[in-house]
Image (cartoon, coloured by chain):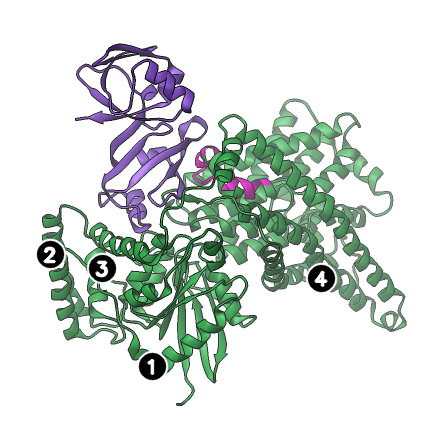
Chain colours: A green, B purple
Amino acid sequence: MADKTLTIAICSIPNTGKSTLFNKLTGAHQAVGNWAGVSIEKKTGHFKLNGHTINLIDLPGAYSITPTSIEETVVRDYLLKTPPDFIINIIDARNMYRSLGLTIQLAQSGVPMIVAVNMMDEARRAGLEIDIGILSNHLGCPVIPIVARTGEGVGELKKTLLETIRDPSKFRPPNISRPPVVEDAIIALAKKLDKINPDPSLNKTFIAERLLESGELPKDISVDDNALKDIVKDVKHLRLRAETSLGENLSITCAQCRFNSARGLVNEATSETIKVPDKFTKALDRVLLNKYAGLPMFFLIMFLLFQGIYALGTPLQTLISDFFANIRNILLSSLLFGSLPDMLSNFIIEGVLNGVGIVISFFPLIAIFFIFMSLIEDSGYMARAAFLLDRLMHKLGLDGKAFINILLGFGCNVPAIMGTRILSGRHNRIRTMLLIPFTLCSARFQVFVFLAAILFAPLTAPWVVFGLYALSFIMVFVVGFILKLFRIAGKPEPFIMEIPPYRVPTVKTVSLRAWMEMKSFLYRASTYIVAGVIIVWFLTNMPPGVEQGSIKTWAGQIGQFLQPVFHPIGIGWREVIALIFGFVAKEIVVGSMAVIYGADTVTQIAASITTLQGLSFMVFILLYTPCIAAIAAIKAESRSWGITGLSLFLGIAIAWITAFIVYQGGLALGFR
Amino acid sequence: MKIVENAEYIIQSVTDVDRFGKRLVQMGVLPGSHLKIIRVGFRGSTLEVMIDQGQSIAVRSKELAMLDCKLIAIPLSALSPEKGRKYKIKNFTGGRGFIQKMKNRKISISDIFEILESHPFELKTRHGTIVAGHGEAEKIIVEPVN
């Protein structure tokens, strides 16, 4: 048999280990893109199977292909428009009923399918026995028990896949019973569809059911438009007749039929079906979700988390920057380097080396952040925290989970933005992403400590920094309320969040997660960051022959050009250059001021900036665009230049307005 | 719809416009499914609800209240006097001591009663009028009788 190139889609409900299996199968051969027309991540990968090339597509998590969310619409449209050669469906061994609704829908599609029953180890531990033979018999396709995390059963899955590729004829769609009026409507419609012959790999009854449920098919599906229009008329009529006779919405009847089958199948294939939350979970929830103790416990846990991140992360970050300082020194003292033109050596050190150094210095923070994050998530506490904070965040049109991301933004914006991936729905993700840059991260904190010490009396300085923290919190809410007035990233989805039982996270999953996040940070963000650092280097060093950071550089000229804009908020051209540097990383604002003001920086700054101007400058730094790594993370996570642009605009606009109020208000009150 | 801990409902129907209900349906929580309110969050806006498979989900009370549900169990403490309205005792959530105390007061499972007063609770049963404190009423789960 000739070797083929085949497309296989992995499709399952959320939280069944879909991505873990995808990673196990494809290894490093992955690419990330967008689904056409929507900013939802499309992950593809490939692997070889006995000479065949398998293109694997990781479909977004969906409860059904009767869409109630954007993700589900993507899945339905994909299956109807470009049916894959095979489907791998994953079901959760611990709660099969929940997963089987989608499995039954997919099994009816006519596309050959293999079902992987994942998390068999946990099901076994819970004393649950599953009769794989019965499942396979009823679903009419091969069913393989696996543990995606450890790779158990994945070999068997590949072997079965190969057998199915050789002989797909074994596949037989399952029968589920429906009320006669629905059955008749589906058959009548399927017959009509037969005539216009849509994609031959799909069952006509499957397409007919999709049409009846939602009354529409995705645009540009491969059938004749006019013929389809004709059929849509029939659909309306058939739907109305069925709904009148049943007294309820057809999509609900269809779901009911599916889940009735699912319930029956679970009863038949498992030793027990009902799992009551364990005693440990109940007891722990009594404390952690307590009406009065729950929130204080949450803040205590978050406080410890913060302390942990910084106690471990900061020394590591210092270690890395020391390492880069050493490389810099070695380079500077090397003979080869000395023979290079000044401009080039400066570019290599201040531009390239600096850029790479910044990227790498984020590593320890990201690793530790995600280790803690996956500890919270895998243990089951994340859902509890979301439950506790939901009321507060709902006021901003978000759900409780977003609070954790925003809170962690106070540590470092970058991993906080990357962490928005765990939020449900694009609406939540994008809005949270837009709010995180307003949090006072540790890099900004360094700038404020430095400036406050110069511009304010020793007793006042800590209060100024504290005030900036308060302002940051307030601005997150103000911007949240402003964003709520606009329609960004679609409608909020109904809030339904699973609260899993508590579990002890495994070292393997936690470390794997941290590793994957570091890799993804390196892959996605590093190019933007290095490019950004290089651009800023050019701005602050060009044209050739001028002194770095002086008024003659392009940055200096931009600073002067922008002077009329910054004058009303009391910021001079020198500070504008520092702000341009701050775009790369907030930490280097201080260093850049040293370059700009030259010798005796502290006295110079104290002499040329008034207290009020300094305050306005700090407010502006707090709120204007986050560093380039954060912007790169926003671009990578939102998968949209529009949202990235909006974030930049929001930051600058809100920073200017707030600084204006502070500066002009201060002047009016007689401060200077 | 009364949102209190330990209240139980059965979903009756889901309409076409109800996005929350439709999403529940696609997750396998269908008309006819049980919902038990396990926990009411701070100031009542977020709830922990147990669904048929023993699984917990968090939902918002506003969205849940829009669902067409039938009450099947509620703590006595959440009710108020209403003439002619009858309830049946379904179970007690207290321990053995509490059940004995109720037994001594001639309150037992399946008893039908009418609420006369709610602070404290005065119940009219076939044994006469029985009084229960608010704390006790929280542990007495009742169901409406048609």
Residue at figure coordinates x 23%, y 56% from the top left: A214
Chain assignment, label 4: A
State which tag comes first along the sequence, 1 or 4: 1
State which tag comes first along the sequence, 2 or 3: 2
Pointers 2 and 3 within a single chain: yes
Mark 3 or 1, closer to the camera: 1
Residue at figure coordinates x 74%, y 47% from the top left: A314
Q: Which mark is residue A216?
A: 3
| Mark 1–mark 2 CB contact (< 8 Å) | no
Mark 2 or 4, closer to the camera: 2
State which tag comes first along the sequence, 4 or 3: 3
Q: What stretch is highlighted in magenta?
A: A391-407
Q: Is residue A429 left or right of residue A229?
A: right
Residue at figure coordinates x 32%, y 73% from the top left: A112
Q: Give the alpha-carbon distance from disc 3 to disc 1, as whole Å.
A: 34 Å
| Mark 3–mark 1 CB contact (< 8 Å) | no
Q: Residue A167 carries which label?
A: 1
Secondary element at image label 2: helix
Read off the residue under disc 4: A356
Amino acid marked by disc 1: Asp
Quarter of the picture containing the C terminus of chain A is top right
Q: Give the alpha-carbon distance from disc 1 to disc 2, as whole Å.
A: 36 Å
User: Is residue A669 something one can see in this rendering?
Assistant: yes
State which tag comes first along the sequence, 1 or 2: 1
Secondary element at image label 1: loop
Pointers 2 and 4 within a single chain: yes
Read off the residue under disc 2: A181
Query: Main SS type for the magenta part?
Result: helix
